[in-house]
Amino acid sequence: MNSRYTRTTLAALTASVLSVGALAACGDDSDDAKSTVTVTQSAPADNTSGSDSTAATTTSQSDGSGSSDHTDARTSAVDAAGALEAALDAKPGSYAVEVDEEDGRAWEITLVADGKGVEVTVDNATGEVTGEQSTDLDAEQREAPSVTAAEAVDAALAEKPGTLDSLDLDQDNGTIVWDATVIDGTREWDIVIDASSGDILRANQDD
């Protein structure tokens, strides 16, 4: 009788232990599931990607807005002849040896006054002299040429109608010349003028 009771008791205890173990296992599985859900919810990776995309778009738009149109001698209100006149009026008794247009903002006219080089800046919109500074001269620029800068401008434009962009008193194979650049629409011409006779020595289209 006692043996049977003991076996019954042991069986009941064993069943209880197994039940508790099963419940514990279920509890562990439940905890694992909850943990997995928590990890999944705490990973909002898409937001970072979206922020990066927005930043990239903003950068792209900023880069595009920074561009500007190039303005040159073709849109200058004051042409080379007008800039020359203004510069020479500011320095009576001088003569010009260089004319350069600076990106639609101003003309830079190099004059020789009392044997010294002076670079005079002329506003391309108003024709006013806005500044001057000393500058070096080339050997061929230290003596006034027979053909003046204004006459060289006229000769260059008569050869190739357009807009004069630059003019420089230079030396070409021992001959003192005016080297002019004329813009004709989309074409650019290099025109060489004899500074003694005013003859056109050559007119070539630049590549």
Image (cartoon, rainbow, N blue to C red):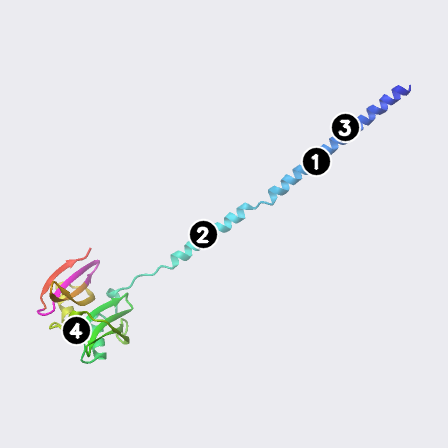
* Residue at which label 1 appears: 28
Q: How far apart are marks 3 and 4 (CA)?
A: 115 Å
**Element type where label 3 sits in the image:** helix
Q: How crowded is mark 4: few (under 14 residues within 10 Å), some or many (20 or more)?
A: some
Q: Which dot, 3 or 4, sits closer to the camera?
A: 4
Q: Distance between the residues labelled 3 and 1?
A: 15 Å
**Element type where label 4 sits in the image:** loop
In the image, what residue type sits under mark 2?
Ala
Q: Would you place residue 99 above or below residue 25 in this image?
A: below
**Element type where label 1 sits in the image:** helix
Q: Residues within 10 Å of mark 3 (few under 14, many from 20)?
A: few
Nearer to the camera, 28 or 70 = 28
**Residue at coordinates 17% horizontally, 61% vertically from top-left?**
190
Is 185 in the magenta?
yes
Q: Distance between the residues labelled 4 and 1?
A: 100 Å
* Residue at which label 4 appears: 142
In the image, what residue type sits under mark 1?
Asp
* Residue at which label 3 appears: 18
Q: How far apart are marks 2 and 1 (CA)?
A: 46 Å
- Residue 90 horizontal/vertical position (percent): 23, 79
- Residue 176 horizontal/vertical position (percent): 12, 67
Q: Which dot, 2 or 4, sits closer to the camera?
A: 4
**Quadrant (top left/top right/bottom left/bottom right) for the N terminus:** top right
Q: In this view, does 199 lie to the left or right of 32?
A: left
* Residue at which label 2 appears: 56
